[in-house]
Amino acid sequence: VANPPYIAPGEPRDPETRHEPESALLAGADGLAAYRAIAPAAAAVLHPNGLLVLEIGAGQVEALTACLEAVGFSDISCRKDLAGWPRAVVARRTAPS
């Protein structure tokens, strides 16, 4: 389970994050840099059928799904927060055939 930085520079920020250091929020030009590092690392250490849960930012479900599929995750789904916004992606490490 991880809540990595997922905001792109120039993207609107929630007022609740005003006290957070930028290193805890910003993740490369498109906000996906942390996921690109986490996905292959998690695939390398998770047991088959192990779960990875990642908090996400707005509009990141499709790009993150592609990133996770590329390194061997499946059964990828998105969970919404209490306000109904996509907030977390859950993925299962594919078991070897």
Image: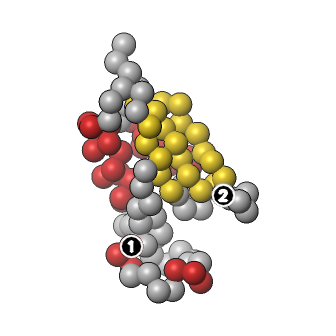
Residue count near mark 1 (Cα–Cα under 10 Å), binned few <14, some 14–19, many ≥20? few
In the visual, does 45 lie left or right of 97? left
Horizontal and vertical percent position of residue 39: 35, 45
Type of the residue with mark 2: Asp
Q: Earlier in the sequence, mark 2 or mark 1?
A: 1
Task: Identify which residue, 28 or 6, lies in the foreground.
Answer: 6
Q: Which residue is mark 1?
A: 24
- Asked whether residue 30 is in view, the answer is no
Seen in the picture, residue 23 relative to 27 is either above or below; the reply is below
For the point 26% across and 36% down, the residue is 44
> What secondary structure is found at the residue carrying circle 2?
loop
Q: Which residue is mark 2?
A: 81
Please tell me how many numbered marks the rendered image carries. 2
Label annotation for residue 58: none
**Occupied quadrant, residue 96:** top left
Horizontal and vertical percent position of residue 91: 48, 38
Horizontal and vertical percent position of residue 19: 47, 86
For the point 43% across and 73% down, the residue is 25
For the point 39% across and 53% down, the residue is 35
